[in-house]
Amino acid sequence: MNARTIRAWRTGCATTLLLLMLAACAKDLPVFTPPAERPLAPTEQPWPANQFLSLAYHDVDDLDADQRFVGVRTDRLLTQLAWLRENGYQAVSVDQVLAARQGGPTLPDKAVLLSFDDGYSSFYTRVFPLLKAYRWPAIFALVGRWLDTPAGEPVDFGGLPVARTHFTTWAQIAEMSDSGLVEIASHTNNLHFGIQANPQGNQQPAATTLAFDARTGTYEDRSQYRDRLTQDARNISARIAAATGRAPRVWVWPYGASTGAAIEILGQQGYRMTLTLQDGPAQLGSLMSSPRFLVSNDPSTREFAHSVHAMEAQEIMRVMHVDLDYVYDPDPEQTNENLGVLVQRIKDMGVTHVFLQAFADPAGDGLVKSLYFPNRWLPMRADLFNRAAWQIFNRADVKVFAWMPVLGFDFGPTLPRVQAWDPATGATRIDPDQYIRLSPFDAEVRRRIGDIYEDLAWQAPFTGILFHDDALLGDVEDASPAARAAYLNAGLPDDLDALRADPDMQQRWSRFKSQALIGLTQELTERVRKIRGPHIQTARNLFALPILDPASETWFAQNLDDFLAAYDWVAPMAMPLMEKIPPAQTDAWLDRLVDEVAKRPGALARTVFELQAVDWRAPVDSRALDSAQLARWMERLQMRGALNFGYYPDDFATNQPHLDTIRPALSREWYPLP
């Protein structure tokens, strides 16, 4: 999505073909779906087998729901439990969940797992009697250091001194454990606090973060982190076992933050379930990263009911696609000021997700020479991605996808790059009108790119990965020696003339390249999930033409059906002006793009259309697209049935696109789904 990308477009006959396919005029009417064909709301659909919802409570108080302790009032808790029971929800135990996981009795419909964090005494005095009255089980998660504080001394509650009587005693814990209703869980022994996580001083969860030492300017070694968490898990496990006679099976993450590296450590320590604060219902296949809904701000019954139903709803994406190159400045103070303006704009815009650039590309040519996080292979332009991602998540309450190249890294001239073949001369060279890319068929290339992704996973918190549009191979690519060897190994000719001479052979070759690129991104995903966690989602940019004309897979090595099968989200570049579509026909072009995706059942729910906020064909000083036009395109997408969309790029410094104009069309709050 830059100047080099534009030059990569197949123009001429491809554009002409698309224009002929467009309707003579576009009608500004929503797509009509007969009532019988409309999908049921999630709450009206049959309950999926062995699905359950998890609720995360904390303190309970008769009068004052103190939000320092994420409290709810006792009467509110009573009505919430009653609402759950009257609406068919049934509390289940950890024993039931683990038995179902092992092939035992299926969980009941509308199963709900209740959990109470931090070890407050209110659980013993107020919640435990309710559980006995309902005969409902629950999880009670303890922080060892807090409970080990001697009577009469204050508990160090994240720097706040709190009376020891605010927490349960080990004797009360033993009594509740013996009741058979309460599962005693670990909430760490002494890691329920924040530690410095970057040079700028952000505090992030100690259990899942590499500590940054401001004195030395270095990060904690990964082996030191593993040792730190391992010892903590051993300490709290031993403490709970001594009090209850049972080793804990459930780990509850402080602040809901988890990572794959930490999950691996806990599995080695005997834990069989960990609870996060991620969105959505829980599944038996992912118990080591199980989501929960945080019951906070003492919600009314109506608010509580809405939140429970929302847990079952399909996730919606409204996206700002952000360049950190716009934020970075050689002066750290200016960088920090820029980031503050950006974060406030993100919050004001009302989006749900940000696709955040993790690489530097100041030249706009797609060749990545430096990154915004520490890594082992490329220079670091600035240690900025961690801070930006954390600020966006923490201050704007928006999910962050790390936007990363796939092949466009500049590791120097020693590693093979994608070579284009000239049919006229038989010579091969790097295509000057395309991204300069590393060959995906070289083992060392794949290893180094994987290292980069792994380093990113260690260094920053994020929800997902967006694979950049540099993952493509044209109809005369790749002709490098590594690629030719891969073709031969797959039973294809290693001669490009032979590969292109026969239509069937060329189709086989295109399919092979498409799958090879997907295979690479899946390798990268696994390396990230191993460190960051199994909850990490994936999205990949897709050119529009392979959607509108599937035969053009030959030109891109991209295929919509492949993408839907391989990734959580597909992100087509819905950019009509970049495709040289005349302005009068852009609506019809967008309609057709949505319609083609809609032909696949359920595909619209997993497709996020990325619109263009600039016209790259215009002079640099007049590229900003009319914000009203962009807003109309967004509304157009919704009328056609699209659920998820966003735009690229955002220029916070010049308010492009204009926030007040674009927000009503983009925000989930201002332009809700019908």
Image (cartoon, rainbow, N blue to C red):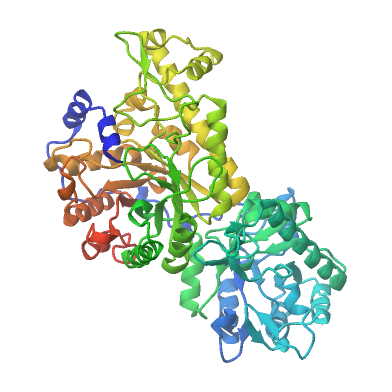
User: From the viewer's perspective, is residue 456 above or below residue 258?
Assistant: above
Q: In this orientation, which residue lies closer to the viewer: 186 or 3?
A: 3
Q: Does residue 431 appear left or right of residue 389 in this picture? A: left
Residue 202 position within the rendered picture, expressed as x and y whole percent measured from the top left: 52, 67
The answer to whether residue 280 is left or right of residue 18 is right
Picture coordinates of residue 669 (x, y %)?
33, 66
The spot of residue 158 in percent (x, y) is 63, 77
In the image, 573 versus 324, the foreground residue is 324
Q: Position of residue 4 (x, y in %)?
A: 29, 35
Quadrant in which the C terminus is drawn: bottom left
Which image quadrant for residue 132? bottom right
What residue sits 29% from the left and 28% below the top? Answer: 433
Numbered circles on residues, count: 0
> Residue at 56% of width from left, 86% of height from top?
65
Q: Is residue 207 visible?
A: yes
Q: Is residue 137 in view?
A: no
Q: Nearer the viewer, residue 299 or 269?
A: 269
Rendered-image quadrant of the N terminus: top left
Looking at the image, residue 517 lies above or below residue 494: below
| Residue positioned 45% across, 29% down in the render | 438
Tell me where residue 472 sits by quadrant: top left
In the image, 419: left or right of 666? Answer: right
